[in-house]
Amino acid sequence: MLIWILYDIKNNINRNKVFSICKNFGMFQIQKSVFLGILDEDRKDIFLENLKNNMEKEDSIVILPTTKNNIKNSIVLGKEIDFDLPLREKQLMFF
């Protein structure tokens, strides 16, 4: 599932943890508090639980499902964003 993750976390420690969780799950940072990535269905519950455990009542995390077509039709003003990065197939390396 292709998703956007947007968050507003007030506490620096929690915000850094949410950032790390997103990175560890293979999400790509688009802006300071915005990530885009592919989340496998079998890892979704673990991802959500990790996020929930690192936020307070006044914080918010928004997870928006999207499609490749929606991403490709996005309009970006200002600094360009490489939307292709999260859409590329992950390559496995064997040694």
Image: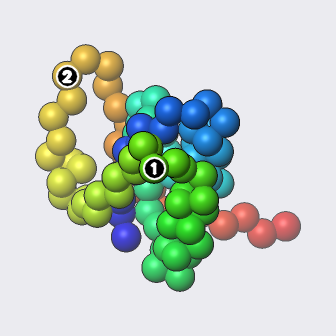
Q: Which mark is residue 12?
A: none
What amino acid type is highlighted by mark number 1? Lys
Residue at image point 44% right, 55% down: 37
Mark 2 crowd level (few <14, some 14–19, many ≥20, 10 Å Cα)? few
Q: Distance between the Cα atoms at labels 2 and 1?
A: 33 Å
Left or right of residue 87: residue 19: right
Please state which amino acid type lies under the numbered disc 2: Leu
The residue located at (29%, 58%) in the rendering is: 64
Q: Which residue ends up furthest to the front in the rendered image?
A: 57
Q: Give above or below for 37 relative to 19.
A: below
Can you name the residue that lies furthest to the right here? 95
Residue at the image position 28 percent from the left and 63 percent from the top: 65
Residue in view at x 39 percent, y 47 percent:
60
Residue 11, horizontal then vertical, whole percent: 57, 34
Give me the disc on residue 57.
1
The x and y percentages for residue 94 are 78, 69
Seen in the image, is 73 located left or right of residue 23?
A: left
Residue 68 image offset from top left, x and y in percent: 26, 59
- The picture quadrant where one finds residue 17 is top right
Q: Is residue 94 left or right of residue 89?
A: right
Give the SS element for disc 2: loop
Q: Nearer the viewer, residue 40 or 48?
A: 48
Q: Quadrant of residue 35?
A: top left
* Scheme by which the image is coloured: rainbow
Sequence-earlier tag: 2 or 1: 1
Circle 2 residue: 77
